[in-house]
Image: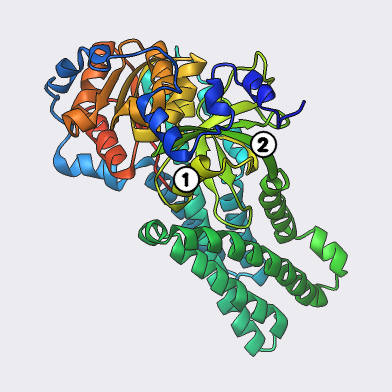
């Protein structure tokens, strides 16, 4: 199949207007004017005020009182979120291991090394695409006939980042102890060689820098630095760890009398490191450059269509990682599966809104010189919206381009859903095609235009739709501040609510 032909692309994505897929010969200014007038989006018109007739009822519904007292409420839903509970569990397990090794016989260097690499292995594995997909699908397979409290707890699977951060922090802690023990060992003329001690200090510096920049406030302010240090310092850490394991195993084998080969294959640290390497390499081994077509929605948003049928098919609640430079920054976007009637399995699209330099640059390039290809890493990976299928009926709350991830769930039709979408000039910004999809899935969708009405009380509106629709859960895709406010505002009133936690 010739994926560079405009006719091929129109056939692969039959629901997308041809004018949106075939590069326009019009100057950018004229194309922008036409898009602003809605001329490239078809001929169907919607009065969004009329399509959301009952929004006033939902926005004026009185909220119930919050459960528990202020102290217990903040303890349960803020201080001890599921993410922090998992972190605390990791802390308890490592504390028990520390006490076990500290009591009685002085711990060997190999045991401390195993504890450090064991934590590092858990931290790396829980970030592997295939492990994430397995766990999400396992929990999401709960029948909807199971009691709601059980499904509500299982839907918290997206907090698995607590295991990553907990194990990573304790990997640094164990390695610090290993460095101190090896320094003392070398000064006392015991097994550790100068090479082993030097490697240990080098790894400690790299791990400390990664852990420091992963602190939430620093990560948010310096996200690119966080991404680069996590990637490249992480690779350097594994590289040096191999030399450390070889050197330390050699040092210890000289005392035990074992051959180096036998000592390696019987050492847990060797196998831990091997699985760490495999987990890191696997998504990068699937990095590929794929042909794309871009549909310009407005000056603030575009939609990228990707023909990627050679790899795993996009499914509801999954995201893909995209980049224009594989050595540079990567960005995650929700994958919206496209029709397979003519395009074959694997075709999907992503909605990109102007939220920074990279996304803004992508939209600008779409006007000036449409990119022909883009880099993709790994396979489509489950995100928070994948838990939607665990409930009989849900309320999807989105602001701005957050409607993109929700479209994947709405199109799949696996769960009955009501929609609350709050954004500025929805039709002018995102186009009639997306508005069509929303209203097709939920004819009673509340599409709230903030340009005309100002910012809504999303907690109150989501609560009103939840009550009116007799839903089982609410899922929100928005910015961090609003997501946290809505999830807390609903959970503290006993309503199952879920939203991304930005821990990666």
Q: Could you tell which of marks 2 and 1 lies nearer the N-terminus?
A: 2
Image spot of residue 122 (x, y percent): 59, 50
Q: Which quarter of the figure has residue 187?
A: bottom right
Q: Secondary structure at mark 2?
A: strand
Give the x, y percent position of residue 103.
53, 66
- As drawn, is 431 to the left or to the right of 368? left
| Label 2 Cα neighbours within 10 Å, binned few <14 / some 14-19 / many ≥20 | some
Answer whether residue 125 is visible to the viewer in this image: yes
Q: Nearer the viewer, residue 464 or 185?
A: 464
Q: As rendered, which of 474 and 451 lies closer to the eye?
A: 451
Q: Residue at x 48, y 13 (%)?
A: 413
Give the x, y percent position of residue 196: 70, 78
Position of residue 292 in the picture relative to residue 103 (left or right): right
Q: Is residue 316 above or below residue 171?
A: above
Q: Residues within 10 Å of mark 1 (few under 14, many from 20)?
A: some
Q: Secondary structure at mark 1?
A: helix
Q: Residue at x 44, y 66 (%)?
A: 212
On the rendered image, what quadrant is the N terminus found in? top right
Position of 22 with respect to 487 (left or right) is right
Q: Report whether residue 397 is seen.
A: no
Residue beneath disc 1: 364
Q: CA distance from mark 2 to mark 1?
A: 18 Å
Q: Which residue is mark 2?
A: 291
The residue lying toward the viewer, choosing from 265 and 455, is 455
Q: Residue 435: which numbered mark, if any?
A: none
- Give above or below for 69 relative to 113: above
Task: Tell me where residue 453 sits by quadrant.
Answer: top left
Residue plotted at (38% across, 47% down): 84
Q: Is residue 435 above or below residue 2?
A: above
């Amino acid at each position: 199949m010739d994926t560079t032909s405009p006719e091929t692309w129109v056939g692969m994505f039959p629901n997308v207007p041809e004018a949106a897929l075939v590069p326009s010969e019009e100057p950018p200014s004229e194309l922008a004017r036409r898009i602003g007038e809605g001329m490239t989006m078809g001929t169907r018109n919607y009065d969004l005020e009329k399509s959301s007739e009952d929004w006033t009822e939902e926005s004026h519904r009185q909220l119930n009182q919050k459960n528990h007292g202020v102290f217990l409420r903040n303890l349960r839903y803020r201080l001890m979120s599921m993410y922090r509970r998992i972190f605390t569990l990791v802390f308890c397990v490592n504390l028990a291991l520390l006490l076990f090794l500290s009591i009685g016989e002085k711990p060997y260097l190999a045991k401390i090394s195993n504890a450090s690499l064991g934590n590092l292995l858990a931290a790396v594995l829980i970030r592997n695409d295939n492990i994430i997909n397995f766990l999400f699908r396992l929990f999401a397979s709960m029948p909807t006939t199971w009691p709601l409290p059980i499904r509500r707890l299982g839907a918290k699977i997206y907090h698995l980042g607590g295991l990553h951060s907990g194990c990573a922090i304790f990997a640094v802690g164990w390695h610090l102890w290993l460095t101190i023990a090896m320094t003392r060992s070398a000064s006392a003329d015991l097994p550790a060689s100068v090479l082993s001690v030097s490697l240990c200090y080098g790894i400690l510096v790299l791990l400390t820098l990664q852990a420091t920049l992963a602190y939430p406030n620093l990560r948010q302010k310096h996200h690119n630095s966080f991404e680069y240090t996590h990637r490249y310092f992480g690779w350097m850490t594994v590289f040096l760890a191999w030399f450390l394991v070889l050197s330390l195993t050699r040092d210890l084998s000289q005392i035990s009398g074992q051959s180096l080969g036998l000592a390696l294959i019987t050492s847990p640290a060797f196998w831990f490191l091997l699985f760490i390497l495999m987990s890191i390499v696997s998504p990068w081994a699937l990095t590929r450059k794929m042909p794309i077509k871009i549909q310009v929605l407005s000056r603030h948003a575009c939609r990228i269509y990707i023909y990627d049928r050679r790899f795993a098919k996009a499914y509801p609640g999954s995201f893909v990682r995209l980049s224009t430079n594989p050595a540079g920054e990567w960005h995650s976007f929700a994958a919206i599966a496209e029709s397979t009637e003519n395009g074959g399995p694997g075709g999907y699209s992503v909605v990109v809104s102007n939220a920074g330099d990279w996304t803004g640059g992508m939209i600008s390039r779409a006007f000036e010189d449409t990119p022909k290809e883009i880099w993709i890493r790994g396979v489509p990976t489950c995100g928070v919206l994948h838990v939607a299928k665990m409930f009989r009926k849900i309320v999807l709350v989105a602001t701005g381009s957050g409607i993109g991830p929700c479209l994947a769930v709405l199109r799949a039709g696996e769960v009955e859903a009501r929609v609350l979408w709050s954004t500025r000039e929805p039709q002018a910004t995102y186009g009639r095609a997306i508005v069509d999809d929303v209203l097709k899935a939920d004819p009673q969708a509340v599409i709230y235009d903030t340009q005309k009405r100002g910012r809504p009380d999303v907690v109150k509106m989501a609560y009103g739709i939840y009550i009116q629709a007799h839903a089982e859960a609410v899922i929100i895709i928005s910015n961090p501040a609003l997501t946290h406010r809505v999830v807390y505002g609903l959970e503290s009133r006993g309503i199952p609510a879920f939203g991304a936690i930005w821990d990666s």
